[in-house]
Image (tube, rainbow, N blue to C red):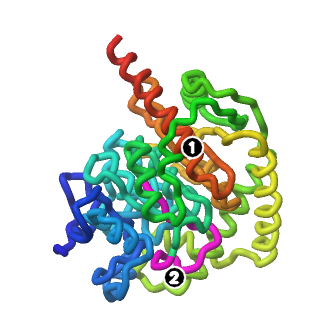
Amino acid sequence: MTAPSSDLDGWRAFVTRVELGGAGRTVAIKDCIDIAGLPTRAGSAAFTDAQPASAHADVVRKLIDGGWQIVAKTAMHELAYGMTGINEVTGTPVNPRDPQRIPGGSSSGSAVAVAASLVEVAIGSDTGGSIRLPAACCGVIGMKPTFGRVSRRGAYPLSSTLDCVGPFARDVSALAAAMQTIADGFDSVSAQRPLADAHVRVLDVPCDPAVRKALLAALVVSGWQSTPANLTLLPAAFDAGLTLINAETFAAFGHLVGSGKLGADIEQRLGRAGQTPVARIAEAEQVRTAFSAEVDRLLDGVDALVLPTLPSAPPTLNAIRRGVSVVALSTFVRPFNLSGHPALSLPLPVTDDPVPVSLQLVGRKGDDELLCALAQHLCPLLEAVHTDFHRN
């Protein structure tokens, strides 16, 4: 292992260099996941003096046993409790797709490391969109597995009903290889078999015209049979997801409020989270049950649900500094943490516009391989369209 580094090739994606594992694919690990012998600081000054982890997290152990090369720990939004990826303690990773825009959070460094080709795969965590959102911001593939499909042992916060550990990659083959390694029973053969003859339901959701245009163009290219649909409880699920992430994050880190060791935004948000009424938590659990059932019904008889990952382009860093809210960015990702369904975000390179646009696939619980198979079919077609666009 080598000494900590706050910068790598100008991207600031890595906070610690590591040399572990074999000679296989390169992978980086989010800094809320234990690597034995290194402190897990979760992007926060509150854990500057944290003791080194005594054991590898399950996901790290499986990667090492599988011969992967673990090369770094990645930067993140403090305490995995934010969507911008901005971090004044470790430095904010620069979005390779558009340096003026946020890298997305909380798994910012993991998304940037993959987008900048610093590693082939990176591992992040997703509690309210924290893999899919930065994947969309940085123009890479990001997957939130079915809740519980990948072990969270050794990941923080220690207890969560929302959080999932999952991979980022630039191509589906690498993503499937990572899932085969970290998820018991994952069938990488079926995951990498392109699914061309598919039937999907396309959710009618409010989004910017450019996002809608890109998504519809991707569906035309896909050749899939598509049916429009409405997910009526989506707004309620978004609110319920916010309620539960606030309550659970406060339960994990509320003792740090008033310590003087938290960033101002986290201090304020945690303070408010601690005031979440018990009755609201109970209501959120009722929404979880109803929303999960509604998603299951919509998935009956089709291969996946399709909707945008983000409702609009990610904001610029300057807009965030001016106080622009980013809460609405998670409108389409957060609900599926609540329900526990697997979801995969993939970029849509169908125009010459540098602004990232992404599509989200949501599948049946436990059917993570099918989402990869759908992406394996669609990604090459989108790349071909992108290539033809530039050639002409």
User: 10 Å neighbourhood of mark 1: few (<14), some, or many (≥20)?
Assistant: many
Q: Is the magenta region chiefly helix, strand or loop? A: loop
Q: What amino acid type is highlighted by mark number 1?
A: Thr
Visible in this render: residue 227?
yes
Taking the image as shown, residue 73 lies to the left or right of residue 6, namely right
Is label 2 or label 1 in front? 1
Q: Rounded to the nearest whole Å, what is the CA distance between mark 2 and mark 1?
A: 32 Å
| Residue 160 within the magenta-colored segment of the rendering | yes
Visible in this render: residue 313?
no
Quarter-wise, where is residue 275 in the image?
A: bottom right
Image quadrant occupied by the C terminus? top left
Proximity of marks 2 and 1: CB atoms separated by less than 8 Å: no
* Residue placed under numbered mark 2 in the picture: 257
Taking the image as shown, residue 377 lies to the left or right of residue 93, namely right
Give x and y (percent) for residue 264: 45, 70
What's the mark number on residue 379? none
Of residue 27 and residue 248, the one placed in the foreground of this image is: 27
Q: What amino acid type is highlighted by mark number 2?
A: Val
Q: Is residue 167 above or below residue 275?
A: above
Give x and y (percent) for residue 382: 46, 27
Give x and y (percent) for residue 227: 74, 30
* Residue placed under numbered mark 1 in the picture: 309
Element under disc 1:
loop
Taking the image as shown, residue 235 lies to the left or right of residue 116, namely right
Give x and y (percent) for residue 280: 78, 71
Q: Residue at x 59, y 39 (%)?
A: 308
Please report the bounds of the magenta region as a residue range. 153-167
